[in-house]
Amino acid sequence: MHLTGPASGPPAVSPAGIVRPLIGLGETLASATGRLGAEVRVDPVGSVAHRAAFTDFGRGGSRSAGGFAQMVRVSDGWVALNLPRPSDIEALPALVGAAVPAGDWTGIENRIASMTAADVVRQGSGLGLAVAEIGATPVPSHPWSVRCESPARPWRGRAPVVVDLTSLWAGPLAGGLLAEAGCRVLKVESTRRPDGARRGPAGFFELLNHKKEPVKLDLPTPEALGRLRELIAGADLVLEASRPRVMQQWGISATEVVAGGTAWVSITGHGRSGRHANRIAFGDDAAASGGLVAPGDPPMFVGDAIADPIAGLAAAAVAAHLLAEGRASLAEVSLASSAAWVAAHGGAAIERHIVGDGDRWRVQLAAGPVTVRPPTVPDRLTAPTMANT
């Protein structure tokens, strides 16, 4: 609630229903990691606010907590447009097809208002922008999908080896949780393009990655790609979060890796296949695509890039399940689809009376008022007991 609602008004209670599916993901993770030999229990509700605890983010309403994404009106609804890079701003005139200065947000916004959501998404995706129509992602039956079954190489008697090729939040969270479960996690980073999370709070990066073994490779040089293939060949599971064309360019096939006995968990923005396969996505716009928004005119963002930690929890759960079951499969976790699953399983909207109390807000419950607290900086990914949630 501290992260959801108008910037200058009371926090929103409406997304409270997502607590139930989040706790369900946490229980699934605990069950799967328990079969690996080291049960991992997390505070799934606290996990979705970990980054905000380090950055001191607050509510932004129709602008994301991080400040880069914004709800923008189109002729038939709303889109979430995420502009975290300078090149994204430079692409705005091309998005609207007019010679409007990139810095003229009012002019850009007026042009977008005359376009349909489908046109903005199609044009923006072609330009490499993270843009999504609110609620456009279909609700999946599960927060992940699994295919390409093959027998896995045996790992019992040693720690499962995980090659973590991910960056930012969702993938590193999944890898960090697998490390907590006793896996030997190798964090592979390109010396030319290291994990973008290194540019953020050091404490947050350490929280996600401190139990992993760092591996630096000069990707994509031939020597580095050769070494990467060696690491993958010796792994029990690969955790990857790039767009499909990246691995194709490197000559690495996930299906061939799976056929060789190594499980592969792929985290994408909008899926590995179909017309959305290479669309870029970040946590805020992907959550909006999944319909995980607070209602309003304009709609408001829920939490901070919430699709990232949701996908990270789901990826860790399915990865631990594949390892425990001895299955070499290709599992896919889409940020937008996992957010849609959580949004759909959140139940009916919950409303409670909120009152201001100085610089704090209180929610009126039957048992009495409860204070809305900001996220607290965690000292670990795991929680001793679910009572701490």
Image: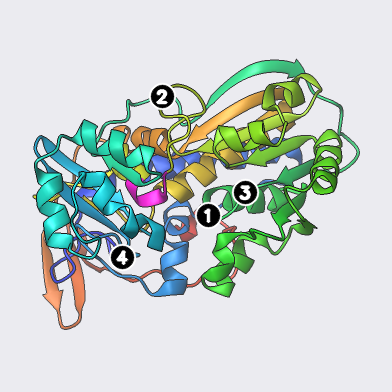
Q: Nearer the viewer, residue 236 or 37?
A: 236
Residue 359 x, y percent position in the rendering: 20, 82
Asked if marks 1 and 2 touch (Cβ < 8 Å), the reply is: no
Determine the secondary structure under disc 3: loop
Q: Which residue is mark 1?
A: 169
356 lies left or right of 244: left
Q: Which mark is residue 67?
A: 4
Q: Which residue is mark 2?
A: 275
The span picked out in magenta is 281-285
Type of the residue with mark 2: Arg
Residue 218 x, y percent position in the rendering: 77, 55
Q: Which residue is mark 3?
A: 166
Residue 365 x, y percent position in the rendering: 18, 58
286 lies left or right of 324: left
Tell me which corner region of the image, top left, top right, bottom left or bottom right, holds residue 20. top left
- Label 1 to label 2: alpha-carbon separation: 25 Å
